[in-house]
Image: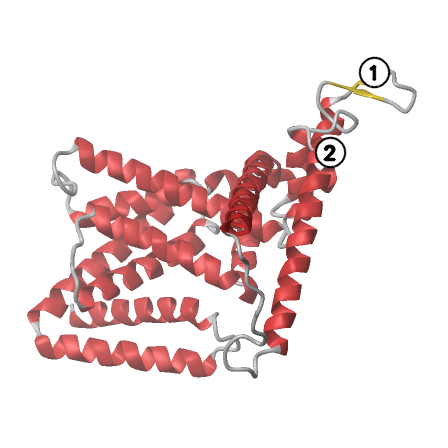
Amino acid sequence: MNPHLRGGRGENHLGKTTPSSPDRDSNLDLLVLSSRASTRQARTRSLWASSKLFSTHIGPPYSCSRHYSSTDNTDSSSKETSSDSSSEESGDEYERNIKENILNASLPFVQNFGWTKNALSAGAESIGYAGVAHGMFPREGAELVLYFCTSCNKKLAEQMKQQTENSGTGPNIHLKPSVFIQDAVEARLRMITPYIDKWPQALAIQTLPPNVPASLANLLTLVDDICYYAGDRSIDFNWYSRRVALAGIYKMTELCLIQDKSEDYQNTWRFLERRIKDVTHLHGYLHQSEEFSQVAKEAVTATFVTVILRSRHSLFYLFTFIFSCTNTWVTWVRRER
């Protein structure tokens, strides 16, 4: 490490030692990370241009006719490559840790600044970095929302895993699957209540086309974890139907939550309970009649095609499809009662 830059004490141009400050060290870390990111982007653009230039060739564009007479050069080259690779990986991990620390420190500022770069700047400054550190997050508030959702999903998965392990071997045997699912969805939704005033902004950010893939992946991961720990081990059509239905229930209850003014959001939890019962009744109907099951599959397919034709964005239709399927199933249940 260069003593003229950071760490301990450095020497000025007169040869005198001068102490370095933690703030300057942290700011220099950000400069190093920014420089590394710029270098990586330039390398990516260069590789992309090369691949585009030679895309019409079959095989490599040029053949190398140079041969080495000794294996020493090859060994040294492989060692250098391995060293560069390991140093790049350690640098990426260092950058990833800094970004995660900034994101985590930014969450308390969401209530004041919303899911914006201002919250990121405030979070960076709170742990000793410069406010311009928000430049490390090109998608600004979207990355903060994604980090929050991912962290909440991991926290819920750990809670469900611990709950199933404490209840005995295998999935939870003391709670009905419907009760377990209802408790899990409520626990997950309660995690957003500290940010309830700013959550409509987070929902709007998630529905932007560039953010839909990551948002959808988070949602599907959430419902898959809940179904798994509730005891679902199906490998047929039920695997898809249960997860799509649960995704729809979660999003509908989430929309109900941000509008709920009742004490402790009791209206939302009653709404969730009714939706869980609707899907439970639907599951019974699907197993009673094979003909009804076939009709359900055809209706879901028709809904899927209709939503594709009516959606403006090719990715946004996935969210709409989930809502449409859930509403269709709830209508079936009420009609059959």
In the orientation shown, which residue stands out farthest toward the left? 288
220 is higher (above) or lower (below) than 170: below
168 is higher (above) or lower (below) than 277: above
Q: Which residue is mark 2?
A: 27
Where residue 14 sits: x, y (%)? 92, 20
Judge from the rendering whether residue 80 lies leftward or rightward of residue 335; answer left or right: right
101 is higher (above) or lower (below) than 216: above
Element carrying mark 1: strand
Q: Which mark is residue 17?
A: 1
Amino acid at circle 2: Asn
Where residue 219 sits: x, y (%)? 39, 56
Amino acid at circle 1: Thr
For the residue pair 41 and 78, the one nearer the viewer reads as: 78
Judge from the rendering whether residue 307 lies leftward or rightward of residue 124; answer left or right: left
Determine if residue 265 is in view.
no
Q: Residue at x 16, y 60 (%)?
A: 234
Q: Residues within 10 Å of mark 1 (few under 14, many from 20)?
A: some
326 is higher (above) or lower (below) than 156: below
Of labels 1 and 2, earlier in sequence is: 1
Judge from the rendering whether residue 56 lies leftward or rightward of residue 251; answer left or right: right
For the residue pair 202 and 220, the one nearer the viewer reads as: 220
Q: Nearer the viewer, mark 1 or mark 2?
A: 1
Q: Residue at x 13, y 41 (%)?
A: 170
Determine the CA span between mark 1 and mark 2: 20 Å
Q: Quadrant of the C terminus?
A: bottom left
In the orientation shown, which residue stands out farthest toward the right? 14
Say which quarter of the image contains residue 64. bottom right
